[in-house]
Amino acid sequence: MKEKQEKGWLRHLTGLQGGWRSLVVIVLAALLLELVSAVQYYYARELLEEELEYRVLTELNVESYVLKQTLNSTEQTLQEHLWDVERNLHEPDSMFSVLHRMVIVDSKVKGGFLAFIPNYYPQKGRLFEPYAYEEGNEIRMEQIADEDTHDYTQNAIFKKIMTERKPFWSDPYQYNSSTGVQSLTTYSYPLLDHHGNMIAVYGLDVSLNWLGDTLNTHRYRPSSFNLFLTRSGQLVGGPSEHFVSKSRTERVIALINDSTVERESIKDGQVNVITFHDKEKKDDGYIYTLSMSEAPYWQVALVCYDREVYGNLDSMRLYIALLMLIGFMLIGFITQRTIHNLLRLQRADMEKERIGSELLVAQRIQQSMLPKQFPPFPERNDIDIYGSLVPAREVGGDLFDFFLRDEKLFFCIGDVSGKGVPSAIIMARAQSLFRSIAMKGSNPSHIMRILNNLLCQNNESNMFITFFIGVLDLPTGRLRYCNAGHDCPVLVGQGSIDAKPHLPLGVFDNVRYDMQELQLKSGTMLFLYTDGLTEAQNAAHKQFGLQRVLESLKETDSCEALITYMTNNVHRFVENAVQSDDLTMLAIRYQRQEDHDELCEEIVLKNDVRQSRQLNDFVRQVLARMPLDDKQARNIRLAVEEAVVNVMEYAYPEGQEGDVKVTLQSDGIRLKVTITDAGMPFDPTERELADTTLSAEERPIGGLGLLMIRELMDSINYERDNGYNVLTLRKKF
């Protein structure tokens, strides 16, 4: 009996020891997995903090850039009209017209003034300050200087300019106008004569009402908002009160201006961070501030909140912890090895899901960068476009893009070497650079050369792109193009076009790219593709090939129908074979539109600016027969006069007499102004703004008035046709 009792206790003790071992194993496994989760949470939070700092720095720099570009535009406007001021100094009353033109050119300029030094114009008295300002839909002009009510020589701005002789931006101030309260800042500039003596203080008043809404159009997080402050902490622009309460905005500004508040510097001291608790939102917040490195040295601030930045991470950690607890309750009887294997599989599945989710997001981002609205220009009957891109993986390296500028269709197609995420990144950069460069010029070889040099910079991965750029002039059908190692496009029914195969982009910098030309007939369809079409393989590893492409192309009712037909042919050929490369196609049909004019008048003038009065009378008489209000007619006359006078002055060599023909046509819906001369070739749409430090004789044609013409007219187009310069301006009624 005693022996049986001892064996029973032994079995019981053994069972207890086994139970305790299992419990210890489960507890240790739980602690281990909790430790792994904590480490993951820590590093994930670190990554989120790094991403937040990077995004914040990008956001602050972008907002600073937007403001600086606007201010630079105003400074440029002032610089561009210095010549206008200087050439009219002999006539004081003409200063009103000069200021009037400046206010019209720049939509953000609400007023302009010239405060002359005392007794500069004796006939005007000691003080003379002409001022042009926007009032409703009108531009008013006044002489606002007065010995009793407005002695500008006592103004701090006037004294500062007279002493330092340097331009500067004033701090913002409020101005009550007929349209409501406006927030303004003034750019003041010292006007000197040829001997370096002060003549006047030259200034522009710029509206800042747009700034707050522009800053907060695209927010980093739903509750995030941006502010602009002066160096002294005065509010320049911020969010509207329906989005962020005035009290919250004031508390944030007070924290920024409080020198006793603790701050942390990040990004090598570029950005300061203030952490605070927002009682209104019941959440911790972060204030990131960046000081502009250039005048006017204002501050831009971004406010975001902890819950929106890290809330998803905290929720994810809680869910994981709950899942782990449930899992341990269910697998308490499983051995240590089984627990270890299951947890390893769980982590692998989570990683796979994370990668798949990130690739899906990347695919959506990449697809959103491509044109996706078809037809893209429903208001036009002269062009039909359709394109498609089917990546071989989640993300691809092919691209196509197009846009309209100055009655020209700019389009491109490209294929990045390799596949996957690296190719997608290069693709996104190339597409962004193409749009940016093409907005400043219309020569495809120049666009290709600049694009190649930029893609060669920091190209440590040695990836390259085959690229084709085309610029189609819609009024004439003239196609200019440049090819960088890409497959030659095809004219449907005619075969491949002749396109010189230059080196692909990103291989060597400073490569020469030649431009070629082709005249498209009305009804012509152009088909562009990447090698994913010709190299598509079936199960027997046989390629689709160029010959099948040419045989499959046929005239269709639309570009979409052509792409759909070609896509179906490829799918039937490859059947169930795995897609090996990105498949990209772009079709363009050109249909030249003939003018059906209800009114067509023309005048031929000599290249003599003294005939500008005759031009003005002619334009005024023709416009009086069109459905235009006074403001539209005035703006059109100003644009036409600026364009024609520039042609008169610069189209022909000095001393050579020539004709300038001006034609005004209307179909009852829009106005078309054509200026034709037989002078030297010159494309004003590709010229940069003129250098106002040069004399009037040295300045290139078209720089000074081009900005004004673009503002007043809907489009401007230039072509060199049979030895003639043809400049076309269009305006819809």
Image (spheres, helix red, strand yellow):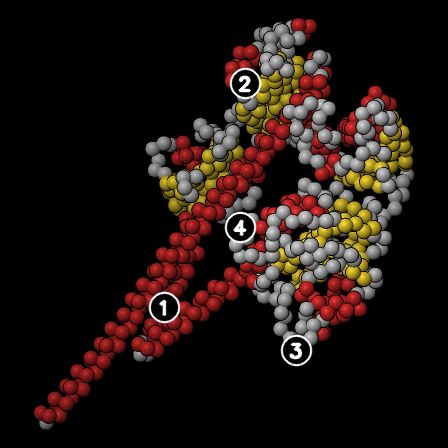
Distance, label 1 to label 4, CA atoms, is 46 Å
Residue 262 falls in image quadrant: top left
Residue 377 image offset from top left, x and y in percent: 75, 50
Please tell me whether mark 1 or mark 3 is closer to you in this view: 3
Q: Are marks 1 and 3 in contact (CB under 8 Å)?
A: no
**Residue ID for mark 2:** 165
Residue 675 image offset from top left, x and y in percent: 83, 34
**Residue ID for mark 1:** 324
**Residue ID for mark 3:** 539
The kind of residue tagged 3 is: Ala
Camera-side residue of 595 and 268: 268
Distance, label 1 to label 2, CA atoms, is 72 Å
Residue 139 falls in image quadrant: top right
The kind of residue tagged 2 is: Arg
**Residue ID for mark 4:** 458
Decide which of tag 2 and tag 3 comes sooner along the chain. Answer: 2
